[in-house]
Image: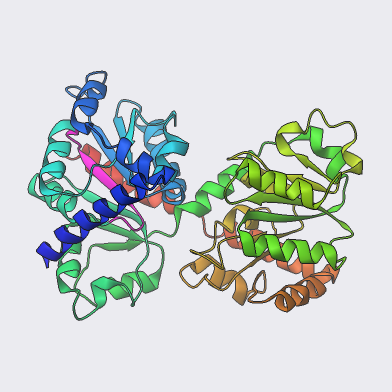
Amino acid sequence: MKLLYNVTVRAYRAAISAAAIAGKEKAQQWLAGRENWRSKLKADLSKLDLTNKKTIWFHCASLGEFEQGRPLIESVRKESPDVNIVLTFFSPSGYENKKNYSHADLILYLPLDTRKNARDFLDLIKPKVAVFVKYEFWYHYMRALNDRDIPLILASAIFRDEQLFFKSYGKWYLKSLQLVDQFYVQSDKSKELLTSHGIKNVEVSGDTRFDRVWQLSQKVKTFNELDPFFEDQKVFIAGSSWEKEDEFTEKLIDDGLLNDFKIVIAPHEITESKIKGYEKKWPGQTFRFTNRKTVKDLRDKKIMIVDTIGHLSSLYQYATIALIGGGFTTGIHNILEAATYGVPTIFGPNNERFQEAQDLMKQEAAFEVKIYSDLTKVFNKMSDEEKLANASEKSRKYVSQNTGAVDIIYAGIKKKLLAE
């Protein structure tokens, strides 16, 4: 099985190389970021004090996992300022967006998971503790950490029956989980699943994203220059919108269901052609978020297009209701960013992997839609002010009552850091 794993890893790299040759930008970034990684890492490490300071290594697959790991990183930085923090990413969407993140001392791509790469990487950074966030299971890195008696913590993890670990043919992968020193999982169900397979070093911590979005909501940045646009009106936000959400938003506008709303559209992928497409579709009615200070009279505008990364989470403070993207493709984007402000959320059917979606739907504070008529039913329901207020309050309470994961996991990290 290890042979099959190694073949799969190398086949993945070959596929990335082929995509890069075909001109795919993210594949090119994936490869370029890993070129000559040893010499680059040695040069970067020469600027850090590895002799007198302990090093903690955080690894995140991409941007979503980073947002889960971020409050942990910042807790370490605040409580243990004399610790070196090394942060790695697997994907370009994580690294390219966060390569200048100020709370880490060193940020880089994770070298491909081979036995030699893992050994060389650990010999260079010499971590005292390693923290993998949510879904990351790289066998050779896990084995190399274990061989060096370096504790590995898996933070904000979630496990489901259908995962490979728990299949009859996945015993090798299940055994690899024994290389983890401590699991901090999001739910009782995840803990029960692990313990039923003989893994006992598990604690239910909850999801660190609750802490993150709650913290942001308590010190949210406001945009006073947008007051004339919002002006105490209802606001519909299409957040991290893909093609299907764009299609739904257009139909809502055409059918008059958004006549009483101001509209904010934040596309999943921000490209000039995408933004110009919106502007062409609704001529004279739109303005770009980056131009908000130069538009003469925002009161006359109907639609704001968010053409930046990083502002959507703050803009949810103005929302009345939000359509969150990803539910018709790879999986829903972060609905907690909206829920923390008491915003009822709507999303597509690919949401079963997201516990917060299941919980909020049970409380009728979030709604799944499969076709456009489902969406119109939700709008009709939320047109009842009492039902809207109830959904809003349930959303806000759900987030505030599920905070605390960061304190639990940080206590475990601190214990490992202080251990001799």
363 and 419: which one is in front?
A: 363
Return the residue found at the far bottom.
168
Q: Residue furthest front?
A: 22
- Residue 187 appears left or right of 10: right
* Occupied quadrant, residue 219: top right
Which of 85 and 81 lies nearest the eye of the viewer?
85
Q: x, y (%) of residue 400?
A: 59, 56
Number of numbered tags placed on the structure image: 0
Residue at 52 percent across and 65 percent down: it is 329
| Residue toward you, 46 or 195 | 46
Residue 318, x across and y down, in percent: 75, 48
Q: Where 301 sits versus 138, above or below?
A: above
| Quarter where residue 169 is shown | bottom left
Q: Residue at x 64, y 65 (%)?
A: 244
Q: Which residues are magenta?
A: 125-136
Query: Would you say 378 lies left or right of 400 here?
Result: right
The residue shown at (84%, 47%) is 283
- Which quadrant: the C terminus? top left
Residue at image position (26%, 57%) is 137
Q: Is residue 110 above or below residue 255?
A: above
Residue 360 in the figure: left or right of residue 69 = right
Quadrant for the N terminus in the image:
bottom left
- Residue furthest out toward the left: 147
**98 magenta-colored:** no
From where the camera sits, is residue 322 visible? yes
Residue 139 rendering spot, x and y as whole percentages: 18, 56
Q: Residue 14 location, x and y as percent?
A: 24, 52
As for residue 129 lying within the magenta part, the answer is yes
255 up-or-down from 407: above or below: below
Q: Compared with residue 206, is residue 91 higher up or lower down, i.e. above or below? A: above
Q: Is residue 367 left or right of residue 387?
A: left
